[in-house]
């Protein structure tokens, strides 16, 4: 952004969920993964379908698959450290 002459607006940000131990860090990270999938990626894929932008849709679908894989890793971590 800076190279294009713009200044990033850092005043509007989501609340940070900072954990105080490993368990809360993993839990907060998993919540963020769910939020990203439900709020951002799936909505963007729908918009790409409406606009018939199949190249971007393919890229987002790949990102969605990666995010789903990350969620699986988080769930495995939770079981490993016995959070469930």
Image: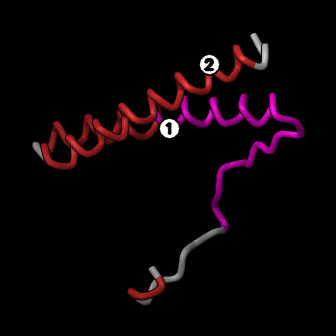
In the displayed structure, does residue 61 sit left or right of residue 10?
A: left
Residue 48 - label: none
Of residue 39 and residue 68, the one placed in the foreground of this image is 68
Residue under pointer 2: 76
Q: Position of residue 11 (x, y in %)?
A: 67, 67
Q: Position of residue 77 (x, y in %)?
A: 67, 23
Instruction: Single out the mark in the foreground, 2 or 1.
Output: 2
Q: Position of residue 45 (x, y in %)?
A: 27, 37
Q: Position of residue 7 (x, y in %)?
A: 53, 82
In the displayed structure, does residue 48 sit left or right of residue 44?
A: left
Label 1 sits on a secondary structure element that is helix
Label 2 sits on a secondary structure element that is helix
Task: Please report the bounds of the magenta region as a residue range.
Answer: 11-37
Q: Residues within 10 Å of mark 1 (few under 14, many from 20)?
A: some
Of residue 10 and residue 19, the one placed in the foreground of this image is 19
How far, Cα to Cα, is label 2 from label 1? 19 Å
Residue 62 located within the stretch drawn in magenta: no
């Amino acid at each position: 952004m800076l190279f294009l002459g713009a200044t990033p607006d850092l005043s509007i940000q989501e609340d940070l969920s900072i954990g105080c131990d490993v368990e809360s860090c993993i839990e907060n990270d998993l919540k963020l993964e769910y939020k990203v999938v439900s709020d951002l990626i799936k909505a963007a894929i729908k918009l790409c379908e409406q606009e018939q932008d199949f190249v971007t849709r393919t890229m987002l679908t790949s990102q969605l698959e990666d995010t789903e894989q990350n969620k699986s890793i988080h769930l495995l971590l939770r079981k490993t450290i016995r959070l469930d």
